[in-house]
C-alpha cells in the first residue's frame, strides 16, 4: 500500500516540474496564424484608388484636348467624313456572308461590340457640334439668305440704294441732362424724296429693331424708304456687325451702299460709296445733297454694272469728281459741235 502511494506522489511531483508533460489523449490543434497588420490593407486601398483616379483624369483630359483640337482644325463635314468608317464599324456585318463559320461570326460580333462605345461617342459629338453650330450661326449670320423679297418683273432694271443710318442719315447722342437725342442730317428729306423716284431705297443698319423702327417712322414721313434691315440681318464677324449685300436678293451689279463708314462696315467693298460721317455739330453739311447729281445720273444712264463705275472713283470725292468729269464731258461735246460747224 505504501509503495502505491509513493508511486502516485512521484508522478504528481513530476508533472508539476515539467508542464509539457501531457498525456497522448489531451493533445489540441496548433493556434491559427496571426492576421496581417491592418496598416498594410489600409495603405494598399488608397494606392489603387489614386491610380484609377489619375488614370481617369488623364483619359478625360486627353479626350477633351483632342476634341478641342479637332473642333478647331476640322469642319463638321470633314470630321463626319473622317469618322465614317469608325461609326460604320459598330454595325456588325460578316465579311463572308452566309458562308462565315461560327468563329468568324463571333470575332466580327466581338469587334463591333468593342467599337460601339467610341462610335457612339463620335456620333454624340457630331450631334452636339451640329446643334452648337446652328445656334452660333443664328447669332452670327443673317436670319435668312434672302433679306428682301423678289423684285417685280417691271422693276428689275431699278437700282437698289442701300443707306446706313447712324452718322449717314442721322446722329444720336446721350447725355445725363437730356438722355437720348436724335438729329436729322441736313438735306435728308430732300435726298430721300428725290431719289425715291429712281431707286429702291433700303436702310441697312446694325442697330436694334426697337431703335430703328421709331426713328425711321419719324424720319421718313413720306415713306420713301421701302425696306428696313437691322442687326439680325447683319453678319457678326471679328467682333463687328457687317452688312452682307450678297444676302439682299438683289443683283450685285445694281446695288450701291452709302455709309459714313462704308468700307469698314460692308463685306462687299466694290459696292461701297463712302460719304463723310456726320455729327450734329456740323450744321452746314451738304454731303447728301452733293450726291444727288451723281446718283441721278447713275439711275438715268443705267450702267450694266455699277462696280466698275465706283472703282473709277476710288480714292476720290465722288461728288467733286463727278462735277469735274461732267464739265469735261460738256467741254468735249462743245468742241465737237464747233468742229461740225466748221466742216459745214
Image (tube, rainbow, N blue to C red):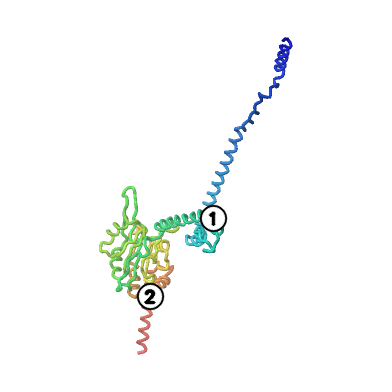
Residue sitting nearer the eye, 327 or 110: 110
Q: Which mark is residue 110?
A: 1
The reply to whether dot 1 and dot 2 touch (C-beta < 8 Å) is: no
Number of numbered markers = 2
Q: Give SS at disc 1.
A: helix
Residue 121: tell me if it is visible: yes
Q: Secondary structure at mark 2?
A: loop
**Going by the picture, which residue comes out furthest to the right?**
3
Q: Position of residue 326 (x, y in %)?
A: 37, 75
Which one is earlier in the sequence, the residue at label 1 or at label 2?
1
> Which residue appears farthest toward the top when viewing the image?
2
Q: Nearer the viewer, residue 322 or 235?
A: 235
Q: Residue 46's x, y, as percent?
A: 57, 38
Q: Does 174 sit above or below residue 145?
A: above
Q: Nearer the viewer, mark 1 or mark 2?
A: 1
Question: In the rendered image, which quarter contains the C terminus?
Answer: bottom left
Residue 290: x, y in percent? 34, 67
Q: Is residue 253 left or right of residue 191?
A: right
**Which residue is disc 2 drawn over?**
304
Return the residue found at the far bottom: 344
Q: Is residue 278 visible?
A: no
Q: Can you tell which mark lies on residue 30?
A: none
**Vertical side of 127 occupied by 193: above or below:** below
Which quadrant does the N terminus fall into?
A: top right
**Label 1, label 2: how many angstroms apart (C-alpha)?**
68 Å
Q: Residue at x 40, y 72 (%)?
A: 309
Question: Which residue reaches farthest front?
Answer: 1
Q: Residues within 10 Å of mark 1 (few under 14, many from 20)?
A: few
Residue 10: image location, x then y, percent: 73, 14
Q: Nearer the viewer, residue 280 or 249?
A: 249
Q: Quadrant of residue 157?
A: bottom left
Amino acid at each position: 500500500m505504501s509503495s502505491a502511494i509513493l508511486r502516485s506522489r512521484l508522478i504528481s511531483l513530476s508533472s508539476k516540474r515539467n508542464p509539457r508533460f501531457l498525456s497522448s489523449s489531451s493533445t489540441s490543434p496548433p493556434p491559427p496564424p496571426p492576421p496581417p497588420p491592418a496598416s498594410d490593407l489600409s495603405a494598399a486601398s488608397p494606392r489603387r484608388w489614386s491610380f484609377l483616379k489619375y488614370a481617369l483624369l488623364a483619359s478625360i483630359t486627353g479626350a477633351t484636348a483632342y476634341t478641342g483640337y479637332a473642333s478647331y482644325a476640322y469642319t463638321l463635314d470633314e470630321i463626319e467624313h473622317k469618322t465614317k468608317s469608325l461609326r460604320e464599324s459598330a454595325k456588325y456585318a460578316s465579311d463572308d456572308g452566309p458562308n462565315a463559320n461560327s468563329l468568324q461570326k463571333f470575332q466580327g460580333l466581338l469587334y463591333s461590340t468593342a467599337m460601339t462605345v467610341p462610335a457612339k461617342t463620335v456620333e454624340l459629338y457630331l450631334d452636339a457640334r451640329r446643334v452648337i453650330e446652328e445656334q452660333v450661326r443664328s447669332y452670327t449670320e443673317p436670319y435668312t439668305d434672302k433679306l428682301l423679297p423678289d423684285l417685280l418683273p417691271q422693276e428689275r432694271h431699278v437700282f437698289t440704294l442701300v443707306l446706313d443710318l447712324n452718322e449717314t442719315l442721322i446722329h444720336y447722342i446721350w447725355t445725363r441732362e437730356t438722355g437720348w437725342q436724335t438729329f436729322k442730317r441736313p438735306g435728308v428729306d430732300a435726298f430721300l424724296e428725290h431719289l425715291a423716284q429712281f431707286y429702291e431705297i433700303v436702310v441697312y443698319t446694325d442697330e436694334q429693331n426697337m431703335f430703328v423702327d421709331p426713328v425711321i417712322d419719324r424720319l421718313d414721313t413720306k415713306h420713301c424708304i421701302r425696306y428696313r434691315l437691322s442687326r439680325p440681318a447683319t453678319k457678326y464677324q471679328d467682333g463687328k456687325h457687317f452688312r452682307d449685300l450678297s444676302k439682299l436678293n438683289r443683283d450685285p451689279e445694281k446695288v450701291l451702299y452709302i455709309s459714313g463708314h462704308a468700307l469698314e462696315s460692308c463685306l462687299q467693298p466694290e459696292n461701297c460709296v463712302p460719304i463723310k460721317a456726320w455729327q450734329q455739330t456740323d450744321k452746314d453739311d451738304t454731303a447728301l445733297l452733293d450726291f444727288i447729281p451723281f446718283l441721278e445720273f447713275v439711275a438715268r444712264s443705267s450702267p450694266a454694272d455699277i462696280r466698275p463705275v465706283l472703282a473709277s472713283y476710288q480714292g476720290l470725292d465722288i461728288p467733286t469728281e463727278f462735277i469735274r468729269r461732267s464739265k469735261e464731258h460738256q467741254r468735249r461735246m462743245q468742241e465737237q459741235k464747233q468742229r461740225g460747224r466748221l466742216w459745214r
